Amino acid sequence: MTESATDLVDAALFDRDRLDPESPYQRSGPAWGAIISLSFGTFGLVTAEFLPASVLTPLAHDLRITTGTAGQALTATAIVAAISAPIIAIVTKRLDRRVVIWAMTLLLILSNVLAEVAGSLPVLLAARVVLGISLGGFWSISAALAMRLVPSHLMPRAMSIILTGVSVASVCAAPIGAYVGDIWGWRASFKVAAIVSAVALLVQLVTIPPLPPIEVRRFRSPLDVAKNPTMKVAVLVVLLVASAHFASFAYIRAFLESVPPLDKKSIPLVFLASGTAGVFGNLAGAFLTKHSLKAVAALPPLLIAVAAVSLLTMGASALTSAIAVAVWGFAFGAVPVGLQTWMVLRAAPKQAESAGVLMVITFQVAIAAGTTFGGLLVDHTGIASVFVYSAVATFLAVLTVFLLGPNRKT
């Protein structure tokens, strides 16, 4: 008898014996409505965070800045998110966690509105700073909230639902953003994102139950979690893979417009293919996690390296470029499942919020480093150079995983 998809995800994402049944994070009954509302929240965040990549060229032209400078909008968000994650965790440590989530979603709406009306780079950067605060606060407690909203044996299913928001945003955000931007202008893309975020807030207001704080938080808490040997290796892999991905991600549209080159109608289709592939990558990541955490940590960066090399060597072919971008999307789609399992659910299940903060800091530092370096490379050495960096960094991540990475139980 074959396993159901739900059973597969449950087995893949969670080792229930690793959690203490007396942990304060445990809950007797599931609150699925709240879990779904968190999925709406992740969808809104991911859509807003990476929307500039799909409208980068017209945005830069309208604001009269270079594409490399426009790409720094991603950098600003990442830097602020890395800084705000531990600060918000400490400042709000005495607040009901649902109030924190509501506040972060309000900031998400404000960010999209500011981006829509931005008439200059400073206003756009202000919008991205507000988004960074929202992103840092939301992601730092989302996994811990999931652990409080469902019983321990349903935790994998809850995480898979929350991460579905990431997958759906990966499918929808880039192609719809590019399509809407090409028809009504790039500002309309941010207006749509604001409306989506408002819907997410309404669902959260209705569904999330009271969640008083239960974990004692200090500024050193993420550093304490980082002392875990498994965490040290995971942090290094995250830095390499995320910086490699985001060094190139913001410039994929510019690459597709100039190297194959593709017309404006074809580019949204390529983004759609990449996003759809990301959903299947998420499912593949869950499957691989069941058998080997080392495999799910090593294979995605290996595929990204292959895709980057393909763009460098055969990117002049429109078909090859489209396939390479789709493979890239599939590979990166597998990353969140493996990272959540490795860093939060397995390495530090009793310090979930602190592990979540560490993950946010690491990921956002990697994004900031990648987008900053990518912008400098694009402006000074050309678009192709960012794919060279991505190939090298992801290959180093693969070597790190094989030499120091997790086994089936760590």
Image: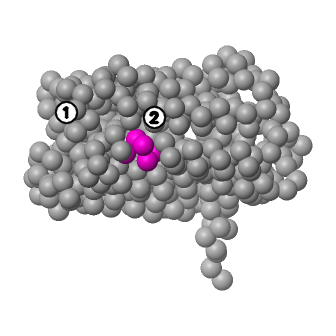
First to last magenta residue range: 189-193
Residue 74, quarter of the rendered image = top left
What residue is drawn where x is 60% and y is 48%? 200
Q: Which residue is drawn at 63% across and 19% down?
A: 87
> SS class of the residue under badge 2?
helix
**Magenta stretch prevailing secondary structure:** helix
According to the image, label 2 marks what residue? 113
Q: In this view, does 204 lie to the left or right of 76?
A: right
Quadrant containing the N terminus in the rendered view: bottom right
Looking at the image, residue 247 sits to the left or right of residue 341; the answer is left
Q: Which of marks 2 and 1 is nearer the N terminus?
A: 1
Find disc 1 in the rendering and name its residue. Answer: 61
Left-right relation of 101 to 373: right
Question: Given the image, on which type of amino acid does mark 2 rest?
Answer: Val
Mark 1 surroundings: few (<14), some (14-19) or many (≥20) residues within 10 A: few
Vertical position of residue 43 compared to residue 140: above or below: below
Query: In front here: 264 or 398?
Result: 264
Image quadrant where residue 171 sits: bottom left
Tag 2–tag 1 contact (CB < 8 Å): no
Coordinates of residue 313 in the picture (x, y in percent): 13, 49
In whole angstroms, how far apart are the C-alphas of marks 2 and 1?
A: 20 Å
Q: Tell me: 179 left or right of 23.
A: left
| Residue 143 at x, y percent in the picture | 66, 42
Residue 46 visible in rendering: no
* 113 in magenta: no
Q: In which quarter of the image is the C terminus?
A: top right
Specify few, some or many for label 2: CA neighbours under 10 Å numbering under 14, 14-19, or 20 or more.
some
User: At label 1, which amino acid type do we have?
Assistant: His
Examine the rendered structure and indicate whether residue 361 appears above or below residue 265.
above
